[in-house]
Image (spheres, grey):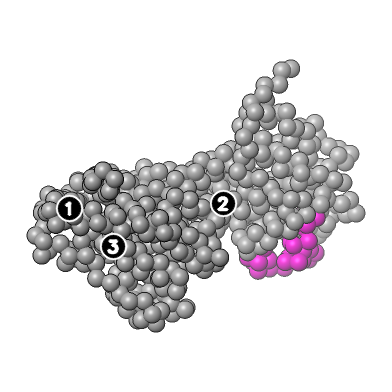
Amino acid sequence: MPVTLTGRDLTIDEVVRVARLGDNITLSSDAKERIDKCRALLDEKVEKREIMYGVNTGIGEFSEVVLTPEQTEEFQRFLIYSHAAGCGEPVPEDGVRAALTSRINVHCNGRSGLRHLVTETLVKMLNRGVTPVMCQRGSVGASGDLSPMAQMALVPMGEGEAFYKGERLPGKVAMEKAGIPTVTYEARDGLAVINGSNVITGMGSLQIHDADRVYRNAQIAATMTMESLNMNTLCFDERLHKARGYPGAVTCAANLRRLVAGSELVGREGQRVQDAYSLRSTPQVIGSALDAFNWSREMFLIELNGVGDNPLFFPEDGDCVTGANFQGTPMAFALELLATGVTTVCVLSERRLNRLMNPALNAGLPAFLTKGAGMMSGLMLTQYTAGSLICENRILCQPAAIGSIPAAADQEDFVSMGMNSAIKGRQILDNSYTILAIEYMAAAQAMDFLKPARPSAASQAAYEIIRETVDFLDDDRPLFDDINRLSEKVRDNTIVNDVENAIGALETSPLQVDRIRYNA
């Protein structure tokens, strides 16, 4: 079913459908009318020779240079050429498709002033699988993601490069193969295609979607470890978390109570009165990540349905207003917080892994979860891998959003660097899949030592997927294939899907909490 873009109600799930599943998009009739009405205002102002930034003036430090009518159209072509100055590997195709979807939805608000023909060309490119090649490096995340977006804007002109049906082709060839006529940009068209932080928005929307999966997996993996360690689950009591009042903690505790329900592994002899922080603090820590996630998600929903462009046109008032709605700082902050949340949840995972491995801490399980300690090292080295990835994530969590470097002769003297936030955020998520996969592997190994006692229904569902992917470690063997295969099960949500089929969906958007205070 096509995704209808209105400019007002695009969701992250719809972005994912277009970017990764190849769903088509259509423009609502209202959106088309708004685009045409806005263009009529711009044409009227051009005819009156009113001065408008980026239409009949230069850009950046050259904004005070007024162009002649003869220069106005040709300027749009040179604008795209000059701004296509990035470098490095291409943005992944799903990120490009997400960025295009985001940009088209900006146009649907009818504030950008471009011709409807240009927007429809972008729609056809998405629907027919023409994906521009855009270098990852070069955007500073203000005045839009100008370098990558300019590379994208070359393709509708029949220039640049594009991926089409698995081939990397010249843009003109890709457009011809897809049966899409190329366009010549007229006044305002080129700048309206590139002047927003839409690559950050597109890539970040996908990361919001993927972080949701990380948090679901983290709670399931935590439950398997907690059961294996005979954890005292009193710390999940709803009253405890409502007494403090953080929605994420209340939500996580509720998930954990459902995940552990029916387990024969908790409540065994030797259960502690209070467990270590890495176990006992799980609702508070993952809950904090959920609260941060919810804020980041809201920031991206605002951006997806707002107008990141400059200048903006207001046909109802007859006005053209210049400002800085292209500024990427809102998304940069959201992505930095998302990265911190994912990394912190992974740190907690590694600390639980340590308790499974360490014979002084693991409630009587074999050292490093092997029967042949000394001759065999068991899962010892998997913890090294998790530690290495956590170190990398900590380095990547250094915020790019504080890294402004002025440009354009200090006319653009503060920039968001949000594209760097998006690039490193993707790597942080990739690392997180493996960290959680290693905890899953260890927890399943521990449960095998605890048979015939049965885990909860949720943990059993997860255990079965793990064992379909990774065999019990009896004698030592190379583990890299096991880790990589299980990491894919985390990435593609296979484990979460089976667990949620068994017990119902987990909550990751924090519940609203009635802040009742429980008195002693």
Label 1: few (<14), some or many (≥20) within 10 Å?
A: some
Whether 483 is among the magenta residues is: yes
Secondary structure category for the residue under label 1: helix
The mark nearer the N terminus, 1 or 2, is 1
Residue 465, percent from left and from top: 74, 62
Q: Quadrant of residue 254?
A: top right
Q: Which mark is residue 115?
A: 3
Cα separation, mark 1 vs mark 3, equals 14 Å
Cα separation, mark 1 vs mark 2, equals 45 Å
Q: What residue is drawn where x is 66% and y is 62%? A: 489
Residue, disc 1: 45
Whether 99 is among the magenta residues is: no
Q: Is residue 41 left or right of residue 290?
A: left
Mark 1 is on which residue type? Answer: Lys
Secondary structure category for the residue under label 2: helix
Q: Is residue 27 left or right of residue 270?
A: left
